[in-house]
Amino acid sequence: MTLRKAPLAIAIAALLLSACAPPVCCPPEPETTELAAMELARAHQARLAAIDDWTLQGRIGLVRGEEGWHAGLHWVQQGDAYQIQLDGPVGQAAMRLIGNADGITLLVPDQAPISADSPEVLIREAMGFELPVSGLRWWMTGRLQPGANAVSTLDEAGRIKEIEQDGWRVRFLDYADVGAGLDLPAKMRLEHAEVTIKLVLRAWQVQAQPS
């Protein structure tokens, strides 16, 4: 009698166990994941768009073929105006670039100031290397340069992971929380033709536009 009821008891127990077991969740649909990433990206870019003025310190290294150099970097951005200073290994000022609505001026120790309309042309002719100042103003805060075609990819937090724009490939290797829920690039790598630029960015100070 007991043996005949055993299969039924086992079946009932199995049903009870399956009812108590947590449901097996399916992985999110790709479309849902992409929509979530896009929403995070919109929120992140909105926070970045509120930045008006910023300053940073860091290091820059440039490699071109078998040649290379590195320097300390100090960048001050105030609206459309900027000052970029590159310092030598012992803190000696090696180059200072000043740009505003009146034009761009390059200051090098023991040389007369040089002015031009384009920072890229000015640096290329005076220093002999490529430095995408116009793009870096935007890329260094994790944004696309306005007015230039671009292809970009996002990370899981909605931040830009890689940009291909204006002939440059820009990779964001690390971000840092600079406060108020704002993430800004901490390490970047730029590649263009035979030139590679590495940036380590720190000591961010940002000022948002008044709401």
Image: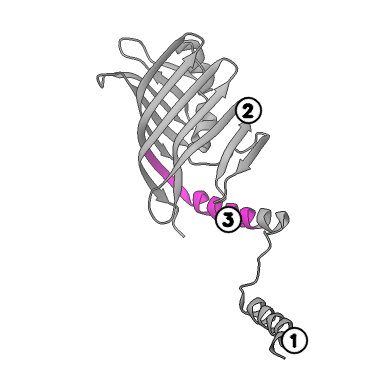
Q: What residue does disc 2 label?
A: 166
The magenta region covers: 36-55
Give the label on residue 40, or none.
3
Inspect the magenta stretch and tell me whether residue 180 lies in it: no
Q: Could you tell which of marks 1 and 3 lies nearer the N-terminus?
A: 1
Q: Kindly state the secondary structure of the residue where label 2 is placed.
A: loop
**Residue 8 on image: x %, y %:** 73, 84
User: Which circle, 2 or 3, is nearer the viewer?
Assistant: 3
Q: Kindly state the secondary structure of the residue where label 1 is placed.
A: helix
Q: How many marks?
A: 3
Q: Is residue 102 left or right of residue 38?
A: left
User: Which circle, 1 or 3, is nearer the viewer?
Assistant: 1
**Which residue is drawn at the image coordinates 66% and 56% (left, top)?**
33
**Which residue is drawn at the image coordinates 24% and 19% (left, top)?**
90
Give the label on residue 4, or none.
1
Residue situated in front as seen by the camera: 155 or 209: 155
